[in-house]
Image: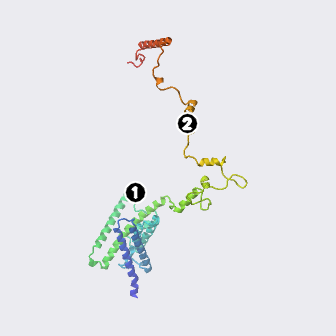
């Protein structure tokens, strides 16, 4: 019976070691968004969830016990929920809000079991009470007092470094002492305290990210290809239920002319059902189809120039004849005398009005 009762503990120990090794192996994969990383991450998450279920079925931890009642080998199983919450935050396959909520639940279970065994330090116990009073608005740092925020950062940084140094020192215990029950217990307790310290920081980050996601506008899921085709048909007044819809590339002429709204023009009572145009003959329809694809000329160039001249769009004259000097007929004495008098008057005007004589206002 004793051998049979130890079998579940052996399987739990093996399962926990396998999941923990898978957790450490993720550090060797450089790209957290790669398919290999996410595949191994999901495997580690499932194994830690199995460890959690198996721990509850075996009733390894009880609310009626104290820290001293937990065996040294069983202390490591307290870290299951903390490891699970840490891994869940790295999940990029599922919806981010669901990932954050699942990780928060795992962290809360970890703090709850530590609080039930009175394993939280005084500072962590105060933080846990603050978290229980207002988990949605929980924050490690003060949002109003900059000095208090700075002091909190410094204090938590020093506390974290002290816990890390203690854990590193205990991890350097000689191999002969690693099988010592007291040494192993000190290592597990130091790691539990460091994980509790990191848990509050993770809960703070999760709360802030959930607030940002809540304020983001809700986006509708991307439409599927069949939804896009159906929406296109609806915009064009067609649907699968419409008899005028065709999958052919060359739909009927009635559908092209009437934009898919084919049907009778007149009702049975003679009332028009849609706009239409009456054509004088079938030959006009034929001429409108079997013709050139460009506009043909309707008159010759000479006819066009004559029409422009008639409309007054062209002016006669111009050229060299209009700008060159005109020859005077020597026999026309009157015109010659007029030209001579004109030239003489211009010369007299130029002599009596020298150049620049009219500009007297701006002289200095």
With 238 as the anchor, is 71 left or right in this view?
A: left
Which element carries disc 2, helix, strand or loop?
A: loop
The numbered mark, 2 or 1, whose residue comes first in the sequence reads: 1
Q: Quadrant of the N terminus?
A: bottom left
Which residue in the protein does label 1 denote? 145
Which structural element holds mark 1?
A: loop
> In the image, residue 349 lies at what x, y percent?
44, 13
Residue 278 in percent (x, y) is at 67, 48
Q: Nearer the viewer, mark 2 or mark 1?
A: 2
Residue at 47% in and 66% down: 98
At x 56%, y 34%, the residue is: 303
The quadrant in which residue 310 appears is top right
- Figure label count: 2
Residue 321 lies, in percent from the top left, at 47, 23
Q: Visible in this render: residue 316? A: yes
- Judging depth in this view, the residue of 118 and 42 nearest the camera is 42
Instruction: Kindly identify which residue carries mark 2.
Output: 300
Q: Residues under labels 2 and 1: Cα distance? A: 92 Å
Figure quadrant of residue 208: bottom left
* Residue neighbourhood size for the residue with mark 1, other residues' Cα within 10 Å, grouped as few (<14), some (14–19), many (≥20): few
Residue 168 to residue 291: above or below: below
**Residue 92 placed where, x, y %?**
42, 65
On screen, residue 82 above or below 316: below
Looking at this view, is 124 or 247 the one in front? 247
Q: Is residue 135 left or right of residue 266?
A: left
Answer few, some or many: residues within 10 Å of disc 2's Cα (few below 14, many 20 plus, some between 14 and 19).
Answer: few
Q: Is residue 121 visible?
A: no
| Quadrant of the snapshot with the C terminus | top left
């Amino acid at each position: 019976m004793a051998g049979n009762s130890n079998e579940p503990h052996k399987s739990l120990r093996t399962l926990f070691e396998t999941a923990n090794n898978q957790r450490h192996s993720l550090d060797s994969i450089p790209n957290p968004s790669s398919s290999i990383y996410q595949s191994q991450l999901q495997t580690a998450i499932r194994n830690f969830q199995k460890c959690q279920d198996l721990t509850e079925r075996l009733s390894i931890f009880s609310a009626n016990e104290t820290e001293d009642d937990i065996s040294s080998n069983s202390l490591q199983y307290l870290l299951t929920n903390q490891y699970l919450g840490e891994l869940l935050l790295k999940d990029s396959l599922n919806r981010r809000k669901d990932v954050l909520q699942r990780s928060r639940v795992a962290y809360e279970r970890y703090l709850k079991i530590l609080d039930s065994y009175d394993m939280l330090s005084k500072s962590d116990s105060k933080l846990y009470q603050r978290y229980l009073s207002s988990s949605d608005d929980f924050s490690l740092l003060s949002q109003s007092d900059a000095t208090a925020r700075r002091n909190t950062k410094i204090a938590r940084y020093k506390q974290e470094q002290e816990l890390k140094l203690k854990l590193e020192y205990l991890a350097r215990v000689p191999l002969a002492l690693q099988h010592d029950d007291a040494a192993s217990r000190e290592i597990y307790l130091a790691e539990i305290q460091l994980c509790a310290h990191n848990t509050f920081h993770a809960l703070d980050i999760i709360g802030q990210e959930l607030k940002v996601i809540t304020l983001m506008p809700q986006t509708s899921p991307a439409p599927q290809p069949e939804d896009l085709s159906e929406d296109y048909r609806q915009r064009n007044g067609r649907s699968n239920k419409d008899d005028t819809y065709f999958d052919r590339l060359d739909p009927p002429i009635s559908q092209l002319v009437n934009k898919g709204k084919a049907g009778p023009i007149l009702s049975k009572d003679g009332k028009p059902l849609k706009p239409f145009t009456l054509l004088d003959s079938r030959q006009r329809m034929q001429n409108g189809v079997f013709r050139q694809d460009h506009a043909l000329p309707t008159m010759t160039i000479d006819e066009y120039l004559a029409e422009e001249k008639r409309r007054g769009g062209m002016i006669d004259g111009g050229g060299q004849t209009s700008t060159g000097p005109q020859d005077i007929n020597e026999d026309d004495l009157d015109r010659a005398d007029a030209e001579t008098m004109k030239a003489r008057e211009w010369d007299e005007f130029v002599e009596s009005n020298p150049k620049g004589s009219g500009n007297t206002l701006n002289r200095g």
